[in-house]
Amino acid sequence: MTEQRTFHILAVEDDPANLHLIAASLRDTYRVSVAKTLAKARELIQQHPFDIILLDVQLPDGSGMDFCHELFSNADQYGDLKVIFMTGLTSAADEVRGLNLGAADYIHKPIVQSVLLARVRLQAQLIRRNELLANLARVDGLTEIPNRRAFDQQINDEWRRAKREHKLLTLAMIDIDHFKLYNDHYGHPAGDKCLHDVAQFLSGFFRRSADFVARYGGEEFAVLLPETNLADAEALFARAQTELESLGLVHEFSQVKPTVSFSTGLCCVKPERCDLETFINTTDQQLYLAKEAGRAQAKGCQL
């Protein structure tokens, strides 16, 4: 998915001829937007995410150098951007200053099309490589689903979004029942396959675009269900339990069922009512109650 996406480039340049050259050179490969002033550039950046900014150093309403500093000083707002300066300045000191501000590269004017294409292609390749590495770092190697690191980032993002939009957020903590007995009797390779099978089942079952399934640690999994109330979540997990049982993953040493099952703790909240730590701890407490009540079931609460 990362390799196929189209990179979005913003060209900030007041010279019409240069803008025409940039757009004509890049539009067949990239999505290109243009701004003739810094004011327009700020407006566009606030409206859309960009990957690369081609930035003139001298603009009618300010300095590209100052704008670069502004972008990197507010990375939380503007995102991770690659800035390529375009300038007629030839001083080494100017180039060093721009690079020290965080710029990725320089294109000297007059702009040469082949140089422009090569510089942009290089930055796109670097972005793609970094995204692929980041994705690998977020995937659990055994189960092939997002790992704890990815979950921690996702729950923070979803928490902020739900709080901002005053929406419900439900978290589920899942523990495979009597997994230690499974490992002890069938061996660790079989245990690894069981973890993989359950992970793939969960990621296939919870398949809305907003749903997020991750390996939380050991035989525990976490599922984030944005904009889902407690009753709906309880119904979903009851059905998930039934469908997992129908797969017939044998666990003859389980003290609950003859097949693999799981216990679930659920918590549904509007984030303005508590903090994130309380949300996670409460979900974990509900998982404990589900296990105490006999396992292979869900326990939930609303905060």
Image (cartoon, rainbow, N blue to C red):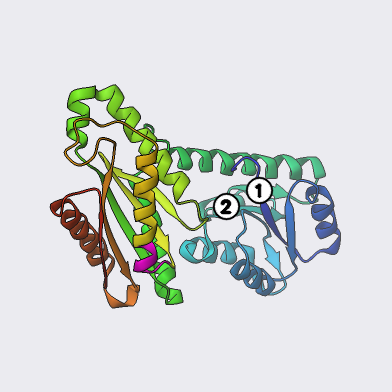
Please state the extent of the stretch shown in magenta in the rendering.
228-233
Mark 2 vs 1: CB contact within 8 A: yes
> Is residue 122 toward the left or the right of residue 199 in the image?
right
**Circle 1: residue type:** Tyr
Residue 114 image offset from top left, x and y in percent: 79, 40
> How packed is label 2: few (under 14 Cα within 10 Å), some, or many (20 or more)?
many
Front residue of this view, candidates 37 and 302: 302
Secondary structure predominantly adopted by residues drawn in magenta: helix
Total numbered labels placed on residues in the image: 2
Q: Residue at x 18, y 59 (%)?
A: 285
Looking at the image, which residue is at 52% across and 39% down? Answer: 132
Q: Is residue 46 left or right of residue 74?
A: right
Image quadrant containing the C terminus:
bottom left
Q: Position of residue 243 (x, y in %)?
A: 40, 45
- Residue to which mark 1 is pinned: 106
On the image, numbered disc 2 is attached to which residue? 103
| Local secondary structure at mark 2 | loop
**Quarter assignment of residue 289:** bottom left
Amino acid at pointer 2:
Ala
Residue 73 in the figure: left or right of residue 303: right
Front position in the image: 181 or 158: 181
Residue found at the far left of this picture: 292
39 within the magenta span: no
Question: Gap in Å between the C-alphas at discs 2 and 1?
Answer: 8 Å
Nearest to the observer: residue 90 or residue 72: 72
State the residue at coordinates (39%, 71%).
168
**Disc 1 secondary structure class:** strand
Q: Residue 199 appears in which quarter of the rendering?
A: top left
